[in-house]
Image (tube, helix red, strand yellow):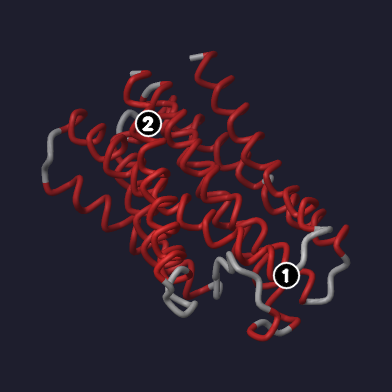
Amino acid sequence: MTSVWLYSLTSVVFVSFISLIGVLTFGLKEDSSKKILLYLVSFSAGGLFGDTFIHLIPEAVSESGFGTHVSVYILLGIIISFIIEKLLQWRHCHIPTSEEHPHSFAYMNLVGDGVHNFIDGLIIGGSYLVNIQIGIATTLAVTLHEIPQEIGDFGVLVYGGFSKSRAILFNLATALTAIIGTLVALSLGVFAQNFTPFIIPFAAGNFIYIAGSDLIPELRKEEPRLVKSILQLVAFVLGILMLFSLVFLE
């Protein structure tokens, strides 16, 4: 059990500090940032789908069979993500655009991001409770998603009136809620036997929602061009293949 705590906390601290990635955008022009982010979004969408269908759902089925309860937990993950998005006006602005976000939204974005990171922490901790391989695969999927998300959130805060240094500091503060989520997951895992059979399909639903509702639509905002579309597809498939490669670690 000690190794589970060590792996979980190390992973979630690593994921939390991805919020500092905004530092790398200091010297980039907005056009350059958008071009890079498009392919990161494609890659992370593939990673989330890869983790969902190659690791999480098969693990949930192997644990308790592919009964109705697995489908219900997956759907619950999608529904909870939808509710959070609606109630907190949570939106992952993976490609920063200053024309769509008023100043007040920057603060709302911080609240929503904190809740989302808390859920990420729950998912990471719950995955490691199943086994180390599932935990690593899920951490990788979360990491792939966090990179474009945190760059996007950084752009929202800067547009909302934050200085770049203050935006990075606030982004880090909300990212640290993931650590609280992991601590909660690990604590519940010790005392609740039915926790991990729920959190794995729930995480799958959460990832399906993020990839399908947040990431894929970002790729459809620009005018379709053959070369860009092919590169996005390549990045998407590479994200899936990276998660598939983790099967050989199991």
Give the position of the C terminus as an image quadrant. top left
Residue 198 seen anywhere in this rendered image of the structure: yes
The crowd level at tag 2 (other Cα within 10 Å; few <14, some 14-19, many 20+) is: few
Query: For the residue labelled by badge 2, is the local secondary structure a helix, a strand or a loop?
Result: loop
Dot 1 surroundings within 10 Å: few (below 14), some, or many (20 or more)? few
Amino acid type assigned to the residue bearing label 1 in the image = Glu
Where is residue 103 drawn, in percent x and y?
75, 81
What amino acid is labelled 2 in the image? Ala
Q: Nearer the viewer, residue 143 or 120?
A: 143
SS for callout 1 = helix
Residue 71 % position (x, y): 19, 51
Residue found 80% across the figure and 61% down from its top: 167
Q: Give the residue drawn at x 66%, y 77%.
A: 97
When the figure is inspected, residue 250 is found, relative to residue 244, above or below; the finding is: above
Q: Looking at the picture, does residue 74 appear above or below residue 187?
A: below
Q: Residue at x 54, y 70 (%)?
A: 91
Rendered residue at 21%/29% (across/down): 63
Disc assigned to residue 30: 1
Identify the residue at the far top of this view.
Answer: 2
Residue on which the image places disc 2: 192
Viewer-side residue, 80 vs 192: 80
Whether tag 1 and tag 2 are in contact, CB under 8 A, the answer is no
The location of residue 163, given as percent across then percent down, is: 88, 67
Report the side of 18 relative to 38 (left or right): right
Question: Could you say where residue 244 lies in the image, as x and y percent from the top left?
Answer: 33, 33
